[in-house]
Amino acid sequence: MSWRDIVNEPDLEFRFCVLGEPVSHSLSPLMQNKALEYLRVNGRYEAIHVSSDEFHECVQHLIRSGFKGVNVTLPHKSLAAGIAEIKHEDVQILGVANCLLFADKIHAKNTDVEGFYKPISHLKPSSAIVLGAGGASLAVCYALLKKHWRVKIYNRTIEKSEQIKQRLNEFGEIEVLKKPSPLECTLVVNATSLGLKQDEAPELMWDEIHHNTTLYDLVYRESDTLFLRKAKNHELNTIDGREMLVEQGALSLEWWTGKHAPREIMRKAIGL
Ligand code: ATR
């Protein structure tokens, strides 16, 4: 169904969606609808496909149709920050938002930042290596620096690592690496897009990893990615990207509804 065919359904108290291109693979509707059901909220969460060209028009249409908020995924996170009239501090700094709230004005948050950090909040901050230097990497590096981690960044295109360093320098210690060396790091994050479509994993100097290291893959599939399988073969601690999906979703739901999100229900809904 096209977003243009969406009509107002006054009976629904809460109506949300995730906007993206592509979006059909998203696990968010499954997870959020289970949460709404558990909370006995009269609401619905949908996945809506929209192109960048039509993003603004689509958001205005959703507001008119009674939506209370939306999540925004690739490639629209910059557009989401741009359309907002009131921006949370993280959105102002990063220039990207994954969550909009429609009230008197359009408000924007980036729940990816906190959502990424929650699954590793039990770790003592030290050094981390982040693989990749795209949008996901920028949010991850920022989340880590904010919590006083020292960040090393490796990307096949070194200029993009340098750009992230320049943007985030003021928030802490960030070093650009020429090779994917995890020496002295207790955390390794895959923030590349490798593993999404095929059985492939980012380059990493596995021989250098300390046994007490946690490997966190932002990419997720129904079963372990190659990156997490390799980590388990090395008997390392792992974190599945779906953990971040749950937390960013839970924070979004709480912001929109003011209710406590049932994280365990949401985790189960997506196979965790
Ligand atoms: P996102 O917003 O999800 O971070 P992105 O901005 O397209 O998506 O970034 C994808 C990241 O995966 C980049 O760091 C990219 O490396 P380049 O900057 O060199 O393009 C990385 N990536 C994608 N395919 C890769 C590959 N085959 N080998 C190594 N890195 C790859």
Image: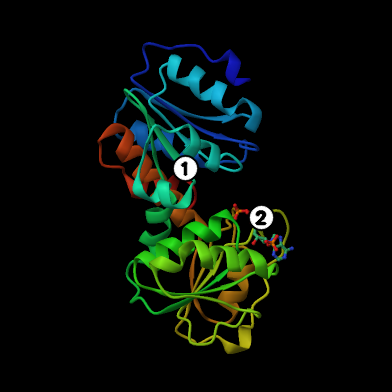
Three-letter code, disc 1? Asn
Q: Tag 2, which secondary structure? A: loop
Q: Position of residue 158 (x, y in %)?
A: 67, 70
Would you say 117 lies left or right of 240 here?
A: left
Query: Which label sits on residue 98?
Result: 1
Q: Nearer the viewer, mark 2 or mark 1?
A: 1
In this picture the colour scheme is rainbow
Sort mark 1 into few (<14), some (14-19) or many (20+) by Cα contacts within 10 Å. many
Q: Is residue 157 toward the left or the right of residue 257 in the image?
A: right
Residue occupying the point 34% across, 67% down? 147
Q: Residue 221: give x, y in percent of width and height.
A: 60, 54
Q: Where is residue 10 shown, x and y percent of the image?
A: 38, 11
Task: Return the disc, 2 or 1, that comes first in the chain's sequence.
Answer: 1
Q: Is residue 179 left or right of residue 167?
A: right
* Residue at 73% from the left image edge and 58% from the top image edge: 198
Q: Which mark is residue 196?
A: 2
Classed neighbour count for the residue bearing mark 2: other residues with Cα under 10 Å, few (<14), some (14–19), many (≥20): some
